[in-house]
Image (spheres, helix red, strand yellow):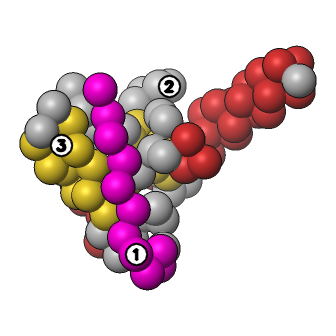
Amino acid sequence: MWIFKYSKGGKMNEPEILMFRGKPYWGYKTCPAWLKMRYRDAVNHICQDCKKDEKKVGKLEPHRIIRGVEGGLYTVLSLNHPKSNVKIVCKACHKRYNYSRKLNYQYSI
């Protein structure tokens, strides 16, 4: 079970601590540029959903699996780590994820 602990300052670019089964993991509320580059390098600049190259679809974006309002952070873990909260997708795939979340929110009220 995840336990989210936020920094006292609440600044967006400061790392936060996530506790999972007694072990700390670091993450960010907003994704710093250096971490975005690290994510894109980790997937060889290929979208994890549609498998298209970054040169064809434009710059890839990090997508939080657990939304920020639910406590999800951009983690410094490797992308294939089971506790990673990030997927690297192209702009079209990212819009698809965000649109489906909006629909789920509208119909759940």
Asked if residue 29 is positioned above or below residue 58 in the image, the reply reads below
Residue of label 3: 78
Disc nearer the start of the sequence (1/3) = 1
Rendered residue at 71%/29% (across/down): 101
Residue 74 in the image: state x and y as whole percent: 38, 53
Amino acid type of the residue that numbered disc 2 sits on in the rendered structure = Cys
Badge 2 vs badge 3, beta-carbon distance below 8 Å: no
- The 10 Å Cα crowd at callout 2, few under 14, some 14 to 19, many 20 or more, is few
In the image, taking residue 61 as reference, residue 6 lies left or right, namely left
In the image, taking residue 37 as reference, residue 58 lies left or right, namely right
Real-space Cα distance between discs 1 and 3?
Answer: 26 Å
| Residue 7 on the magenta span | yes
Real-space Cα distance between discs 2 and 1?
Answer: 39 Å
Disc nearer the start of the sequence (2/3) = 2
Rendered residue at 37%/70% (across/down): 7
Q: What range of the chain is rendered magenta?
A: 1-11
Quadrant where the C terminus sits is top right
Asked if residue 101 is positioned above or below residue 60 in the image, the reply reads above
Amino acid type of the residue that numbered disc 3 sits on in the rendered structure = Ser
* Callout in the foreground (2, 1): 1
User: Regarding mark 2 in the picture, which secondary structure is present there?
Assistant: loop
Residue 81 in view (yes/no):
no
Real-space Cα distance between discs 2 and 3?
Answer: 20 Å
Residue 41 in the image: state x and y as whole percent: 24, 53
Residue 64 in view (yes/no):
yes
Residue 38 in the image: state x and y as whole percent: 25, 59
Residue of label 1: 8
User: Regarding mark 1 in the picture, which secondary structure is present there?
Assistant: loop
Residue of label 2: 50
Q: Quadrant of residue 33?
A: bottom left
Quadrant where the N terminus sits is top left
